Amino acid sequence: MNVPERSHPAPGPSLTEPDPKCHFCRNMAEPARVRDRLVWESASFHVHHHVEEDGSSYLGALLIQTKRHAPGLAELSDAEAQELGRLIHRTSRALKSCTTAAWTYVHGFTEAYRHVHVFVAARYPNTPKAYVRLAVAEWPGAPKGDHHDVIELARRLRESMLAMEDGEATSR
Ligand SMILES: [Zn+2]
């Protein structure tokens, strides 16, 4: 097999400037947009509950995003990648503990905005086959709520995430 010689070093953490046109950079530049839906925050990551523009939102849809404008998963540092894995795990546990989710969906395309973001969503046990995978929010019987319901769920998820962090701190 002919492997082309690599002329550049392997992709690594890149220093990227915030992009004012990027939805996820705007979330960080204008924290009021997501503050009341905050589930977790660290130096590198921000986790908040997703909301639909029309006011009725699928309950249990979380967005994990990098704070910096990281253009793809390959451009994360080792430490960021490890933290992302831990956040997917913990948000999944929090969703199972705060909703009736049977398990969680994880997806991220980095298509509309080249800024790392991963959806972690509750997969409810009675979801009809016609609405599985990317269509869960279109299911008319899906658990949905208004902005107040989302804020309340985000608060409970935040407490659940904090309890996991405290549990890990005490077991160290
Ligand atoms: Zn961005």
Image (cartoon, rainbow, N blue to C red):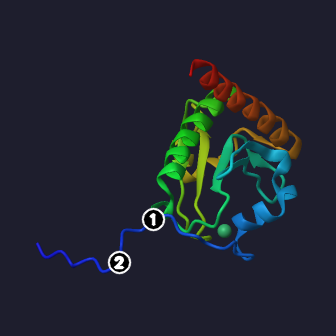
Q: Is residue 106 visible?
A: yes
Q: Quadrant of residue 148?
A: top right
Question: Which amino acid type corresponds to the residue marked 2 in the rendered image?
Answer: His
State the residue at coordinates (45%, 65%). 12
Q: Is residue 123 visible?
A: no
Of residues 151 and 172, the one drawn nearer to the viewer in this rendering: 172
The picture places residue 160, in percent across and down from the top left corner, at 70, 28
The picture places residue 117, in percent across and down from the top left corner, at 60, 57
- Looking at the image, is 153 positioned above or below residue 45? above
> Neighbour class for label 1 at 10 Å: few (<14), some, many (≥20)?
few
State the residue at coordinates (36%, 68%). 10
> Neighbour class for label 2 at 10 Å: few (<14), some, many (≥20)?
few
| The disc label shown at residue 8, or none | 2
Disc 2 residue: CB within 8 Å of ligand 1: no
The picture places residue 4, in percent across and down from the top left corner, at 21, 79
Of residues 18 and 26, the one drawn nearer to the viewer in this rendering: 18
Q: Is residue 103 left or right of residue 66?
A: left
| The disc label shown at residue 55, or none | none
Q: Secondary structure at mark 1?
A: loop
The residue lying furthest to the front in this view is: 172
Residue receiving disc 1: 12
Question: Which amino acid type corresponds to the residue marked 1 in the rendered image?
Answer: Gly
State the residue at coordinates (58%, 41%). 87
- Looking at the image, is 87 positioned above or below residue 108? above
State the residue at coordinates (55%, 69%). 71
Q: Is residue 162 left or right of residue 149?
A: left
Q: Quadrant of residue 120?
A: top right
Q: Quadrant of the N terminus?
A: bottom left
Query: Which corner quadrant of the figure contains ligand 1?
Result: bottom right
Q: Quadrant of residue 153?
A: top right
Asked if the residue at tag 2 contacts the one at tag 1, i.e. Cβ–Cβ closer than 8 Å, the answer is no
The picture places residue 154, in percent across and down from the top left corner, at 78, 39
